[in-house]
Amino acid sequence: MTKTLILIPSRMAATRLPGKPLLKINNLSIISHVFKKAEETNIGEVVVATEDQEILEDVLKNGGKGILTSRNHKTGTDRIFEAYKKLNISNVDYILNLQGDEPNIDKDDIINLNNFMINNDSEIGTLAAIIKDDKMLVNKNIVKAITESKLDKDNFPTALNFTRDNLSKNNPNTYHHIGIYSYKASTLEKFVSLSQTKNEIENRLEQLRALDSKLKINVALAKSSSIGVDTEEDYLAIKKIMEYKS
């Protein structure tokens, strides 16, 4: 039986919206919404990895699990690797890194990515959605994934590139990248041992380190684009959507 561990990195010191993990939607913090969504997938144990005591306390208060990590990590992946090592859970095959600021991600998309990883014995996998609004192509806050072939619900092609650049709508096989990653445990260990590349630092995209180091990233099609909470506007938009749904 394949074993997956879901880890959610989270910290208070976000550049554009400090303290966002504890902002409330329907009287529940964003980070606790993400934890509960991950738990609903039933694909493995879920743990929040954080450097902040107040995040840990919030997660525990709301019935979740968390672990304190160092304040000195450059990336979320470094944080989840420390958590994985500290937790010392035996026989983990895959580690799924779920972003702590996407409370409306579809749980079926998470399950689908996990299934693709296991069925294809992949090293690294992520999600991308069809771009329905051309404005997304020219928005540098939105990361685009470019795949070797057209995404559909049954395939898991490799990524050729990830970019924040303005792109033409004629650019083939371009999708909205959703920041969730699944790693084979051995690949995660290899990835965090690699130095950050110039490409990664300049573009502020961690996944470029993998591509620069010839690690393959497979991409599964997500049902829809989830909204990441990076700004006050994002928070108000997602709050409105989620509170309306409830």
Image: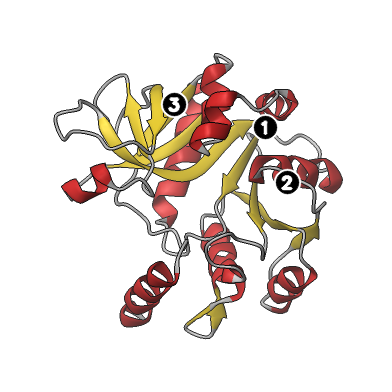
Can residue 123 be seen in the rendering of this structure? no
**Which quarter shows the C terminus?**
bottom left
Q: Earlier in the sequence, mark 2 or mark 1?
A: 2
Q: Residues within 10 Å of mark 3 (few under 14, many from 20)?
A: many
Q: Which disc, if any, is residue 93? A: 1
Picture coordinates of residue 94 (x, y %)?
A: 63, 35
Q: Nearer the viewer, mark 1 or mark 3?
A: 3
From this viewpoint, which residue is outermost toward the left?
Answer: 170
Left or right of 2 in this view: 224:
left
Q: Amino acid at mark 3?
A: Asn
SS state under label 2: helix
Left or right of 171 in this view: 207:
right
Residue pointed to by mark 2: 79
Which residue appears at 40% of the width and 56% of the height? 106
SS state under label 3: strand
Q: Earlier in the sequence, mark 3 or mark 2?
A: 2
Residue pointed to by mark 3: 218
